[in-house]
Structures are given as C-alpha cells and as structure tokens.
Image (cartoon, rainbow, N blue to C red):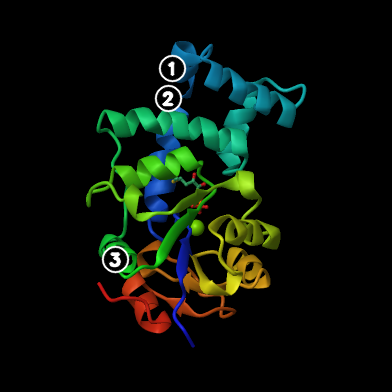
Amino acid sequence: MTSPRAVLMDIEGTTTSIAFVKDRLFPFAEAALDGFFAAQGSAPEVAAILDQVRAAAPGQDPVAALRGWMATDAKVTPLKALQGLIWRQGYADGRLKGHLWPDVAACLRAWHAGGVTLAVYSSGSVAAQRDLFGHTEHGDLVPLFRGFFDTRVGAKREAPSYAAIAAALGLPPGDILFLSDIAEELDAAAAAGMRVCQLVRPADGTLASGRHPEEADFPGVARRFGLPAA
Ligand SMILES: CSCCC(=O)C(=O)COP(=O)(O)O
Ligand SMILES: [Mg+2]
C-alpha cells in the first residue's frame, strides 16, 4: 500500500501530553479569566466571544457559563477561542512553552522534508494551535504545517468534519492519515475514508481501543505507514 500524502494530527494525547493540556493550559486560563475580562473585556475580539457565549447559553451569566464549560472540559468553540487568547499572553511573555513529546518534532521535520503535507485538527482554537507549535522547545514549527483546523469545521467525532478537512486540503480522504489518541475520533475519520492510527502513549495512560492500528510514538507511525524516517 502506498504511503499517505498527508498526515492530519490531533494535539492532546497525540503530539502533546494530556498532562500539559489538563494540568498546565486549562488551569492557566481559568486562573487568568477574571483579570483577562477586567483588562480586555471591552476589546472587540473579546466582546464577540462573549456574544457567542450568550447565544450558546441563553439566560446565563456568560462568565459563569464559561466556568461551567471549563469544569466539564466542554469542547465549545467560544470557550476554546477565549482560552486561546489567554494562552497567547503566556506564550508571548514566556510563562508557557508548547509541549511536544520528544519523538514528535524530528518526525514532523522529516515528514515535511519528504514532501508529506502536514495539518492539525484539534478542539483548541486555530490561534491556540499556532501558538503552541510556534513556541516549542524545538523552535517554531508552524511553517511545517499547511493547515490548522478546529471545531469551526465541525465536531471531532463526526465524519463530515474529516470530509471537510480533506476538501480544504484538496486531497482524497484516502491519501490522508489521521493520528489521534481518541478511538471515536478515529472512527469518524475512518468513516470519512481516511487512514487512521491510534497513538497509545504509555506516559499518557492511553488505552488501546483495538479498533484501529496503534503505535506508541511517531517513529512507529512512520515505520508502519512508510513515512520518511527522522
Ligand atoms: C491547542 S492546545 C489545547 C487543546 C485543547 O484546548 C483541547 O481541548 C484538546 O483538544 P484535542 O482535540 O487536541 O484533544
Ligand atoms: Mg487527543
């Protein structure tokens, strides 16, 4: 079988540790929330997010709605947009560094150098994705990627989202390999015709679903799917 022409990847649990997202990024945004609104609540970008929160949670105080979504890790677009704005300040002043598992950066560089199209699909906003990959221990990796996709393209557990991403990349779904730790996301991508592989990273405690090919790291993915070696 030919190797994939593109690799589409999830962030949390795939390129990046679950602990970094849950124990560093999410608490960072939650702790900064009140101060952020006090300083920037009237900025047009922030006001637009608050309007989206009011539309999604009618009758609720918008900040209370945001805190409720944070508490349940809801993948709601306005929450993700707001978290991205708050994290931006942390990346800019050096309090945040985008975490990548040690095997990831070298593989991304090798795959890109070998002509493989790279793209990201995460619940985190496109701005947050670009900030994470732009501020890693391995430098700015944003130029390696052709596309970044978030929940505005659709939910990660629904097949049409993956069809829309393939169309945006201008590739047949069968030419794209999707990498994620979440079996339901892989189910949806496979239903849209993509090739898939579950990242079962021991340090994240990921459980293999048994429904998809599985690998513990990106070099394993490269070997299995015939991608360039790092
Ligand atoms: C851009 S990093 C933050 C990721 C995030 O907010 C999140 O909810 C994790 O979602 P993923 O789709 O990457 O598992
Ligand atoms: Mg994930």
Q: Closer to the camera, 113 or 125?
A: 113
From mark 3 to mark 2, how far is it between C-alphas? Answer: 39 Å
The image quarter containing residue 166 is: bottom right
Label 3, secondary structure: give it.
helix
Left or right: where does residue 147 sit relative to residue 210? left
Vertical placement of 189 versus 58: above or below?
below
In the rendered image, the quadrant that contains the C terminus is bottom left
Q: Amino acid at mark 1?
A: Gly
Label of residue 32 in the image: 2
From mark 2 to mark 1, how far is it between C-alphas? Answer: 6 Å
Residue highlighted by disc 3: 113
Q: Closer to the camera, 23 or 170?
A: 170
Q: How many marks?
A: 3
Q: Are marks 2 and 1 in contact (CB under 8 Å)?
A: yes
Vertical placement of 24 versus 194: above or below?
above
Q: Which residue corresponds to the image point at 48% horizontal and 33% vertical from the top-left? A: 83
Left or right: where does residue 70 sit relative to residue 39? right
Q: Amino acid at mark 2?
A: Ala
State the residue lying farthest toward the front.
Answer: 170
Left or right: where does residue 60 sit relative to residue 214? right
Residue highlighted by disc 1: 35
x, y percentage for residue 20?
37, 48
For label 1, count other residues whose C-alpha is less than 10 Å away and answer few (under 14), some (14-19) or many (20+).
Answer: few
Q: Amino acid at mark 3?
A: Ala
Does label 1 or label 3 sit earlier along the sequence?
1
Q: Which residue corresponds to the image point at 58% horizontal and 55% vertical from the top-left? A: 168
x, y percentage for residue 192?
66, 68
Pair 3/2: label in front: 3
* Whether residue 57 is visible: no
Q: Which residue corresponds to the image point at 48% horizontal and 58% vertical from the top-left? A: 10
The image quarter containing residue 223 is: bottom left
